[in-house]
Image (cartoon, rainbow, N blue to C red):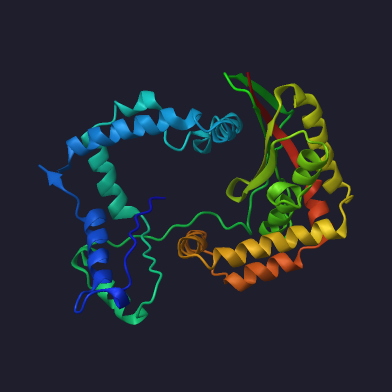
């Protein structure tokens, strides 16, 4: 998915007779659909500049050790799939990219990609929709078939791994980075909401089991959290620990997984996890960029579910739902970045 966006001052604060929204919208559409061409190709000078920028970005991935370890764990889990590729690619592949390849890709992309335009602010919706539809660049676009990613209500069964993969990588660091990739095999109804609850209870919030038991009570981690990658049905546990505490920290993390599986968490812990998700969703809808990203995700998954329905789905999740899901969870990969 490619995203292009522009921030604009509201017309309410513009000078008389100045329509800043339209000017910015025209600029954005011009950048996307009417790029600078030379002999029918994109500008090679710009390509070379962006190659250098991309190399810098790729080489900087080791600067953030937490993200580096996280991305490497994903690569180890999905090394044979596109999802396992580092999102910015690899430096050795950059120089071989040609202007012809980039130009061909651009035209294919513009002719075939599903295009959605989102606008947030004080707008006249009917006027703005007509203005965009009548834009000459928009009118020149070819028709296309809308495509979506798979709905999370109709997921395929994941294949179980035969055994846990354990990967150690050495680097000149003082704090170890432990990342554990979990697979979810459940096909329960209302699965997305139950996954969110499992992740929240495990490690997403300050009241989670990982934060309270691994970080606060045992003092075995500087950071202890988890995140859900719903499109791949994975949860990733991410901890910053003293390198010599690896075995003890891993043992305690496994115990947190068993706590959920056995239903040994309290009602207060369950309720706190639920309220944490709902509060996060409420905050999300109060910020323009986050709100647009929410609607992009909703559009691309072909799910015409209103925001209030997501809240309702979360409220319906029971302790038994989370326990049932937890029994289908297994560790796929343990990745440890150490010195």
Is 21 located above or below residue 196 in the figure? Answer: below
Task: Judge by depth and name the residue closer to the eye, 114 or 294.
Answer: 294
Q: Quadrant of the C terminus?
A: top right
Task: Judge by depth and name the residue closer to the eye, 81 or 37.
Answer: 37
Task: Judge by depth and name the residue closer to the eye, 256 or 144.
Answer: 256
The part of the image, by quadrant, that contains residue 28 is bottom left
Q: Is residue 206 left or right of residue 46?
A: right
State whether residue 190 appears in this view.
no
Is 292 located above or below residue 201 in the figure? Answer: below
Residue found at x 55% / y 36%: 67
Q: What percent of the width, then of the height, locates residue 156?
A: 64, 49
Task: Judge by depth and name the residue closer to the eye, 219 or 319.
Answer: 219
Q: Is residue 36 left or right of residue 253?
A: left
State whether residue 184 appears in this view.
yes
Q: Is residue 136 left or right of residue 172?
A: left
Q: What percent of the width, then of the height, locates residue 313?
A: 69, 67
The part of the image, by quadrant, that contains residue 245 is top right
Q: What percent of the width, then of the height, locates residue 320?
A: 84, 58
Is 308 located above or below residue 253 in the figure? Answer: below
Total marks drawn? 0
Residue found at x 71% / y 26%: 242
Q: What percent of the width, then of the height, locates residue 18?
A: 20, 74
């Amino acid at each position: 998915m490619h995203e292009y966006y522009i921030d604009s001052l509201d017309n309410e604060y513009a000078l008389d007779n100045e329509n800043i929204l339209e000017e910015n919208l025209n600029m954005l559409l011009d950048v996307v659909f009417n790029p600078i061409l030379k002999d029918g190709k994109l500008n090679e000078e710009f390509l070379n500049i962006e190659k250098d920028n991309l190399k810098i970005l790729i080489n900087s991935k080791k600067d953030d050790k937490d993200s580096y370890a996280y991305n490497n764990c994903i690569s180890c889990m999905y090394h044979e799939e596109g999802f396992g590729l580092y999102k910015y690619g690899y430096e050795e592949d950059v120089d071989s990219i040609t202007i012809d390849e980039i130009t061909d890709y651009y035209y294919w992309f513009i002719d075939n990609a599903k295009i959605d335009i989102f606008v947030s602010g004080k707008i006249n919706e009917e006027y703005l929709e007509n203005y965009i539809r009548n834009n000459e660049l928009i009118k020149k676009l070819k028709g296309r078939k809308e495509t979506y990613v798979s709905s999370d209500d109709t997921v395929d069964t994941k294949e179980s791994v035969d055994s846990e993969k354990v990967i150690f990588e050495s680097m000149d660091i003082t704090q170890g980075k432990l990342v554990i990739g979990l697979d979810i095999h459940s096909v329960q109804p209302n699965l997305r909401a139950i996954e969110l609850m499992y992740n929240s209870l495990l490690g997403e919030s300050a009241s989670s089991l990982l934060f309270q038991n691994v970080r606060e009570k045992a003092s075995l981690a500087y950071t202890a959290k988890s995140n859900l990658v719903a499109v791949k049905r994975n949860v990733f546990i991410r901890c910053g620990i003293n390198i010599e505490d690896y075995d003890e920290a891993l043992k305690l993390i496994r115990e947190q997984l068993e706590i959920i599986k056995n239903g040994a968490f309290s009602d207060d812990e369950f309720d706190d996890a639920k309220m944490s998700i709902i509060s996060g969703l409420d905050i999300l809808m109060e910020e323009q960029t986050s709100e647009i990203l929410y609607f992009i995700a909703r559009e691309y998954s072909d799910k015409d579910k209103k925001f209030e329905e997501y809240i309702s789905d979360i409220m319906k999740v029971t302790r038994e739902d989370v326990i049932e899901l937890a029994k289908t969870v297994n560790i796929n990969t343990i990745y440890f970045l150490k010195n």
